[in-house]
Structure formats: structure tokens, C-alpha cells
Image: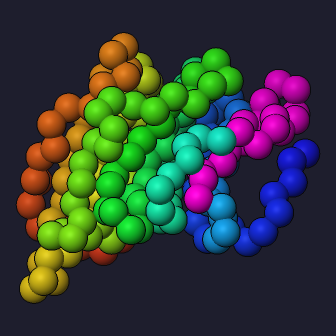
């Protein structure tokens, strides 16, 4: 069991199919993203760990897990618009490279963040942005798990709300 003092303003969770889970959240008065891992074998939540201390309030959190219990979190920071990510493996959160993986603010402020993982630990991040004319654009960025390194950001075209992303 873990305790969070304060109100969470963003939340996301994921499972790996083996009964394990990760939940991440950010607090209104806490410029940090925290997470807890649920061990499906022990049937117990681990302590709240800091995923990242951030300069401005984190928004639009998304987390995914692969079959081995490795996870990845993706988020946008409100004040600077940075898209950032952190990988969870062996009980430790590590920021991915580059950091940030994209800076879309103020030209195209992200309005939706999604992340998905494949069975090999690779991840794909996607976000939808709106420019001054409210045209929505999707961005795609693959992650190489061996190097903990994101690829180049690609504009993949027009998107609509309630989009989803999967990676296999």
C-alpha cells in the first residue's frame, strides 16, 4: 500500500498480462511524476517512486508495459511543452534519451499523449497537436529499448480526437 498526499491531476495505468501493473500520477502541488508497481506474484504494491521531477506541471500522462514487466511513461509538461519519457526496468525509472524527446510548445501544443510497447520492449509514442487553425497533427516516435533512445519525430498526418496507438 502507498499513500499520496494531495490531489492527483493526471493519472495512467497499464498491465502486462501476467498480473503485474504500473500506475503513474502527478499532483497538483507536486512538480513530480510518481509511480507504483504492482507485483502480480506477491499480490502487493511497491512504494511510490519518483519517475521524474519536472520544471512545470506534467499533463497527459500515458504508461505502457510489455510482457516482461518493463514499462515506459510518456508525458507533456504544461509550461514548456516538452514531451518527456522514462523507462521502468528492474525496479528503477530511467529518463530516456534525448530528454526531452520533443518540444512542441507553443507552435503545436500537444492535446493527447499515447504510448504503447511491443513484446520486445520497444515503444512507440504518439501525440496529437493543434496549431492556430485547430488542425490536428499526429507525431510518431519509436524507442529502441537496447539503447534507451528515441528516434526522430515524424509528422504522420491528420488525426482526430480519441485516436489510439498500438505497437507489435
Q: Is residue 50 visible?
A: yes
Residue 112 position, x and y percent, is 35, 66
Q: Is residue 14 magenta?
A: no
The answer to which quarter of the image holds residue 43 is top right
**Residue placed most toward the observer, 123 or 165:** 123
Q: Is residue 34 magenta?
A: yes
Image mark count: 0
Q: Which residues are magenta?
A: 31-49
Image-based side of 2 in relation to 9, left or right: right
Quadrant containing the N terminus in the rendered view: top right
Q: Is residue 119 above or below residue 157?
A: above
**Residue placed most toward the observer, 124 or 32:** 32
Q: Residue at x 33, y 30 (%)?
A: 97
Extreme residue toward the bottom, this view? 133
Extreme residue toward the top, this view? 146
Q: Is residue 11 visible?
A: no
Amino acid at each position: 500500500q502507498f499513500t499520496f498526499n494531495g490531489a492527483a491531476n493526471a493519472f495512467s495505468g497499464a498491465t502486462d498480462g501476467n498480473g503485474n501493473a504500473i500506475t503513474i500520477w502527478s499532483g497538483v502541488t507536486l512538480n513530480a511524476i510518481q509511480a507504483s508497481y504492482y507485483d502480480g506474484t506477491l499480490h502487493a504494491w511497491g512504494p511510490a517512486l519518483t519517475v521524474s521531477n519536472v520544471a512545470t506541471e506534467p499533463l497527459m500522462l500515458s504508461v505502457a508495459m510489455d510482457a516482461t514487466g518493463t514499462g515506459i511513461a510518456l508525458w507533456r509538461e504544461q509550461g514548456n511543452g516538452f514531451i518527456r519519457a522514462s523507462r521502468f526496468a528492474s525496479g528503477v525509472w530511467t529518463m530516456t534519451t534525448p530528454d526531452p524527446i520533443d518540444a512542441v510548445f507553443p507552435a503545436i501544443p500537444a492535446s493527447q499523449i499515447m504510448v504503447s510497447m511491443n513484446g520486445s520492449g520497444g515503444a512507440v509514442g504518439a501525440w496529437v497537436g493543434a496549431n492556430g487553425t485547430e488542425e490536428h497533427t499526429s507525431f510518431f516516435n519509436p524507442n529502441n529499448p537496447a539503447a534507451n533512445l528515441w528516434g526522430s519525430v515524424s509528422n504522420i498526418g491528420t488525426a482526430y480526437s480519441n485516436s489510439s496507438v498500438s505497437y507489435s
